[in-house]
Image (cartoon, rainbow, N blue to C red):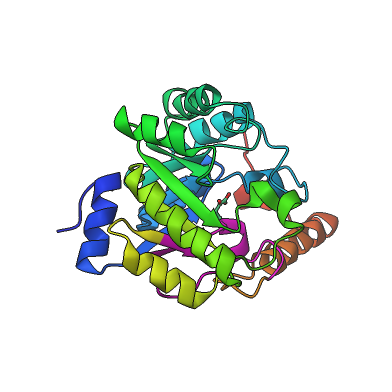
Amino acid sequence: MEPKKITAPYLAEMKRKGVPIAALTAYDATLAAVEDKAGLDVILVGDSSGMVITGLPDTISITLDEIVFLTKNVSRGVKRALLVADLPFGVAQVSTEACIEGCIRLMKEGRAEAVKVEGAGHTLEAISRMTEMGMPVMGHLGLTPQSVHVFGGYALRGAEEKEAQRIREDALKLQDAGVFAIVLEKIPVELAKVVSESLTIPTIGIGSGSHCDGQILVSYDMLGLGPKFRFVRRYLEGSKLIGESVRQYIDDIRNRDFPNDDESYFA
Ligand code: KIV
């Protein structure tokens, strides 16, 4: 029986039953409602908003206030999916307390039902404390975009054994700290498989192959509104279709075809 509402514990049940988890990002109530009605399991207000919404080249500059605002809006469109919000760069980096306070804001003001925190180093203590006090936390390993300047770009992570071992260990540490799921971003298929099999909680992959327990994409990428990456499958040629519609709209105005009488009010 499909539940009316997806919860963090239900995702573990999906893993146990072998049902792959379907997740996407959303940044506004309108798209979130469409995604929710289509039957997604998880909707993430990602810090990818720092790229696709604000137009910057990375996720570094989006602020906690901005993600709280976006989450609040998305929450009004989501009924069934589990709503997760990303803790942006510059919060957990300050202190354990700042991390916890930031996540509380995402839940209290943004109405997120869970939070996502990148990494498993300095954030581990905060993650442990939050899960202990009843806040559902999602982990994020591999290509963690908030560390882009340490990585020197967005290349595949965990291809070398030393880093692969670190990812395997971090996944277990996160599970011990109580996270309910872990995003695995852009790591080799074989590593994602080993990590997924080593955990009882689900992994949600992005650019990490088919052995993860679920998949997530940035909605704008899968709708064809952004650049085409190897790991993205486009389900709509959004830029092309929207561009054509806008050009048609301009032509219709220029030709005085729009609005016609049916599209106008008469006294
Ligand atoms: O910010 C984001 O959108 C993400 C996902 C793509 C996993 O972290």
Quadrant (top left, top right, bottom left, bottom right) of the N terminus? bottom left
Residue 79 drawn at (x, y percent): 34, 42
User: Residues in magenta?
Assistant: 204-228
Residue at x 40% of width, y 49% of height: 173
Q: Can residue 213 be seen in this view?
A: no
8 sits left or right of 74 in the view = left
Foreground: 260 or 245? 245
Is 214 part of what is drawn in magenta?
Answer: yes
Residue 158 image-quadrant placement: bottom right
Residue 150 drawn at (x, y percent): 73, 51
Instruction: Spot the residue most to the front.
Output: 162
Foreground: 73 or 141? 141
Residue at x 34% of width, y 59% of height: 202
Instruction: Spot the residue most to the right.
Output: 254
Residue 126 drawn at (x, y percent): 45, 31
Is 259 part of what is drawn in magenta?
Answer: no
Instruction: Spot the residue most to the left.
Output: 1
173 sits left or right of 62 in the view = left
Depicted 238 relative to depicted 151: above or below: below
Residue 222 image-quadrant placement: bottom right
Q: How many marks?
A: 0
Residue at x 46% of width, y 53% of height: 170
Foreground: 36 or 55? 55
Depicted 109 relative to depicted 210: above or below: above
Depicted 67 relative to depicted 261: above or below: above
Residue at x 68% of width, y 37% of height: 62
